Amino acid sequence: MSDVRYPFTAIVGMADLRLGLLLNAVSPAVGGVLVRGEKGTAKSTMVRALAGLLPSIATVGGCRFACDPAAPDPQCPDGAHDGADTASRAAHLVELPVGVTEDRIVGSLDLERALAEGVKAYEPGLLARAHRGVLYIDEVNLLQDHVVDLLLDAAAMGRSYVEREGVSVRHAARFLLVGTMNPEEGELRPQLLDRFGLTVEIAATRDPSERAEVVRRRLAHDADPTGFAARFADDEQTLAARITTARALLPEVLLSDVALRQITAVCAAFEVDGLRADIVMARTAVALAAWSGRTEVLEEDVRQAARLALPHRRRRNPFDAPGLDEEKLDRTLEEHAEPEPEPTDEPDPDPDGGPEGDGPDGNGDGPDGGPDGGGAPDPAGPDAPALDEPARDAPAGDTPAPDSPAQDVPDRSPAPGPAREKAPVAAGEPYRTRLFKVPGTGKGAQGRRSPAETDGGHTVRARRPAGTLTRLHLAATLQAAAPHQHARGRTGRALELRRDDFREQVRQGRESNLVLFVVDASGSMAARQRMTAVKGAVLSLLMDAYQRRDKVGLITFRGAAAELALPPTSSVEVGAARLESLPTGGRTPLAAGLLRAHETLRVERMRDPHRRPLLVVVTDGRATGGRDALADAGRAAGLLAAQGLASVVLDCESGPVRLGLARKLAGQLGASAVTLDELRAEGVAALVHAHRPTAGTTGPANRKAA
């Protein structure tokens, strides 16, 4: 693999991404850019190529924090820089790996010097290295939330604050922040999305000629990287010079009251939360004007700034897709544009218009050049890009009135045959659910559901490391070594340490789990109001899984078989979409659904052995399709119970006649049984305590999800 970077100007297409990156290069105060797109769309290639365009920076010689000699940081941990030598170097591109830890980001105590020399010294982290350069986070949606929040705090304030292990340090941390993500692998929480200044959606072109050119250039670069880079050297220099020029022009750009009023009006019209969007739009519009070589912000700058800064801020819940109504944007800009000048009383020097007397331009009947005066130009401009939005289904209120809910009576459906499929019904409004946890302490990926030993939790104790030491517990290590210093002949300040002295931290936090839904979609659940409530409950649990960073899977059973509608994934949004389109009807093969869950969990256990599962069975407990259908379901439930699986049965039985089959199934699974009404978080505090296993319980009770 060659070290010669791919030229920025050699990348085909990707106009929005190109513009978003360049605006941040001109003005890092914009707040960075989040690149959302499918795999294989040159996201990482373009970000790495941008670093080569940034101007070289002057630094104080020997300063680990890249202080600017013209304005050194008065709080720099390396001390005052009066009279220090200067040096010049390229801006750093710092890449943040997915598994990065907090101490690697912000820095920590220099343990080598602390133990060897007995001094307290600070070892800078990646934020210090990225100062005045580019901080690139690939797959930012896979980072832990607290890590992302830490990075975005530093990016917003331009300064990193370190308070850990007896070290108190503050240093400048201004950088161009770029994150990339594939939405198929899970979304960022809206709170974190809002912290990115701009967001760009990208997808691979469907034009065969453009795709061919991409492949042609990639092959040429791989065959001769140096020669390929030389072909674009002039274009690269021109673009780098334009960035430098725009940076110099930036302080001279005027943001008029009219432009500012348009910005605030657009943010208010789209009902974005807070005022961060207004500030980001203002900075982006100013950067756009500087990039265009102008000293005044125009309406077109405000429009483009809105397209880049607002779509990801309009999400009202985790399942909303980012987007922007172009017509509403144009209408708002027009309503708050600078008013037209008042007409004067001077006579028209040419009352008959043009030479043909047809109008001002002599080529139309109306005042605007059209036969009926309707030829005014589109306020969005002829070249304004349109955002394609998928057609929305008719709201649930347009459908016929729902039937009365059928009473729950034993199934008397005819002999097996083709399932009578009913059209999907809309889900009810989601709500906050009670928390279900997997009992015990796990070791899975950090999340927000079940107790676990994690890398980012609070320290609860120290222990001898079983393998490689990864998280030194300094106090415990010193306590273990202190009694032996005299016997080891210590004479100076440095400690005499042995391998047996070292202790590591044991941290406890919360992990994410695999929440596998097994949903009954048979005819017994098909009453419209009932299925609406069931879908609303599952959607609420999906939203809860989203907020707790879980993986989710969806199994449905109806007719004669069960289907893995959604293989386990981190993209909870896909699960919500599959649930929305779920049809109902036919028999109730409950045993097939449970056996499919058993097989799915077996495969996932091999793929990710540390992620503990939580099974959620959504059913009224009925089973049809054979003489021993209920007995078969009981045997399948016993198979799952034998694995010590944490599970919950969401009892969907309703009506005056209740058979209690769902609660019987819960007993066979060793699970908690919760009704739709009990699922809601409000008013169920007593139920939470009732379902939580007590200390020392054994048998099926300790597998219930608390």
Image (tube, rainbow, N blue to C red):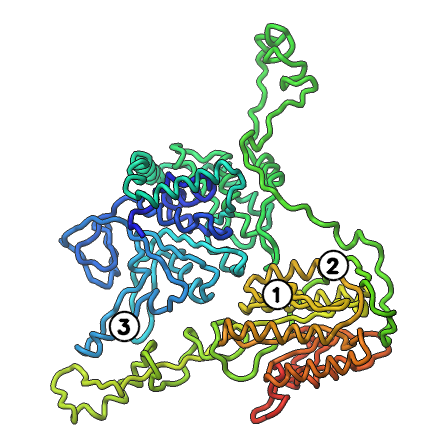
Q: Amino acid at mark 1?
A: Met
- Residue closer to the observer: 11 or 109: 11
Q: Examine the rendered structure and indicate whether residue 529 appears above or below residue 387.
A: below
| Quarter occupied by residue 521 | bottom right
Q: Examine the rendered structure and indicate whether residue 486 appears above or below residue 529.
A: below
Element on which disc 2 rests = loop
Label 3 crowd (10 A; few <14 / some 14-19 / many >=20): some
Per the image, the residue denoted by label 2 is 426
Q: Earlier in the sequence, mark 2 or mark 1?
A: 2
Q: Amino acid at mark 3?
A: Leu
Per the image, the residue denoted by label 1 is 543
Q: Earlier in the sequence, mark 1 or mark 3?
A: 3
Q: Residue at x 37, y 69 (%)?
A: 101
- Left or right of residue 620, residue 695 in this image: left
Q: Amino acid at mark 2?
A: Ala
Asked whether the viewer can see residue 308, the reply is yes
Element on which disc 1 rests = helix
Asked whether the viewer can see residue 686, the reply is no
Q: What is the distance, in whole Å, between disc 2 and disc 1 at their CAs?
A: 16 Å
Label 1 or label 3, whichever lies nearer to me, is 1
Per the image, the residue denoted by label 3 is 109
Screen quadrant of the C terminus: bottom right
Q: Earlier in the sequence, mark 3 or mark 2?
A: 3
Q: Residue at x 31, y 75 (%)?
A: 165
| Quarter occupied by residue 386 | top right
- Left or right of residue 211, residue 131 in this image: left
